[in-house]
Amino acid sequence: MSEPVQALRWRDTAQGGYLQMLDQTRLPAVFHYRDYDSAAGVAEGIRSMVVRGAPAIGVAAAYGVALEAMRWCQVAAGSDDFNHALDQGFATLAASRPTAVNLFWALDRMRVCWQKHATQTKGELAATLLKEAKFIHEDDVRINRAIGANGAALLPDGARVLTHCNAGALATAGHGTALGVIRSAVSAGKQIRVIADETRPFLQGARLTAWEMVQENIPVTLITDNMAGHMMAHGEIDAIVVGTDRVAANGDVANKIGTYMVAVLAQRHKIPFYVACPLSTIDMTLTSGSQIPIEERAREEVTGYRDCQWAAEGVDVRNPSFDVTPAELVTAIITETAVIHHPDLKSMASLFSR
Ligand code: MRU
């Protein structure tokens, strides 16, 4: 297997450094990294989905904070102006996308770091924030490998595994969550075939998951979303593994629109439905999935794709980007520390009391 692609890269320079993000809106046709040097730039990269996937969004936001601190070190600003600008940077990043809790988790971590080192000079603080962002970045790879090891044991040799959206290296700092489970199973010597849902309307399955698997010679079959039921009914799928953007305290799971449909079908066909995620994706402040904010995206994503618009001009459109799968449909949640079978309030709380 070759090394998985990197969604984010930090580049050190004499002036401090800058962030590079692989433009996922253009994959797989164009492989191009964009450069970022401010919180506003990174926030726009998140909003426009140059970077996407819950953990990757969190890592990008952490770098966004560090970049803003570095930027304000270079202008002659007093500490009040510096603090105000950094606060603005946090607010801009927080407003970029609403559903993936990793964004807010990473921003909280960066704010705690700022508060802890509030007596440092501007230059020292910028360096401290960059160190924290780099730690979050590197730690995500370690966490994904642990998720992968925990989840790989659940997949039988020869399994045909359906996944929805992209929860791979592109959606994280590396290895992936759902695709991390598959990568780890393959590394352990298991024969796995991935069935990738196309994932309308943004096509993360067709454009990103299928591409990641092809790059690494992991067998993959691409289907459109409406083929999943047929495949399950014909015994062509043995397990489902997806990622998630936010899990509520009762185990309800928000993930890419269409995941709920897959989970309902999986229950009907008695196929295990697994969710792979880091602990940072679990939001214990929300008692159920109904409280998870669901992003609505632009109508143009539904009426067509890029320059090609195929729906009638003026038609009413809805474009909720995520849905919630109730915990009762989840066979297990796979995290870096434990696998929680049949999640509920009690078993989810146990993840944080170890
Ligand atoms: O809109 P996206 O592409 O950011 O949505 C991504 C997903 O829904 C992923 O499944 C989720 O973030 C988990 S990524 C490890």
Image (cartoon, rainbow, N blue to C red):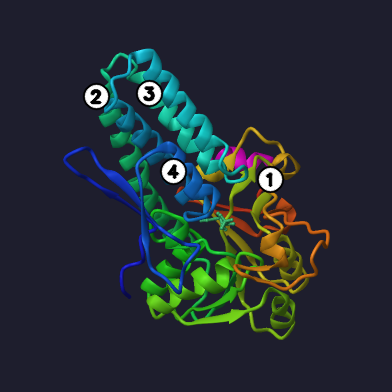
User: In the rendered structure, does residue 2 fall within the stretch colored magenta?
Assistant: no
Mark sitting on residue 124:
2
Report if the CB atoms under discs 4 and 1 are less than 8 Å apart: no
Where residue 241 sits: x, y (%)? 57, 65
| Callout 2 crowding tier (Cα within 10 Å): few <14, some 14–19, many ≥20 | some
Would you name the residue on which mark 4 appears?
41
Q: Measured along the vertical axis of the image, is residue 292 above or below residue 176?
A: above
Considering the image in quadrants, where does the N terminus appear?
A: bottom left
Q: Tell me the number on the disc at residue 114.
A: 3
Q: With respect to residue 15, does 335 lie above or below?
A: below
Image quadrant in which you'd find residue 85: top left
Outermost residue, left side: 14
Report, in whole angstroms, how far the alpha carbon at label 3 lies from the one at label 1. 35 Å
* Sequence-wise first label, 3 or 4: 4
Q: Which residues are magenta?
A: 344-351
User: Which of marks 2 and 3 precedes in the sequence?
Assistant: 3
Q: Residues within 10 Å of mark 1 (few under 14, many from 20)?
A: some
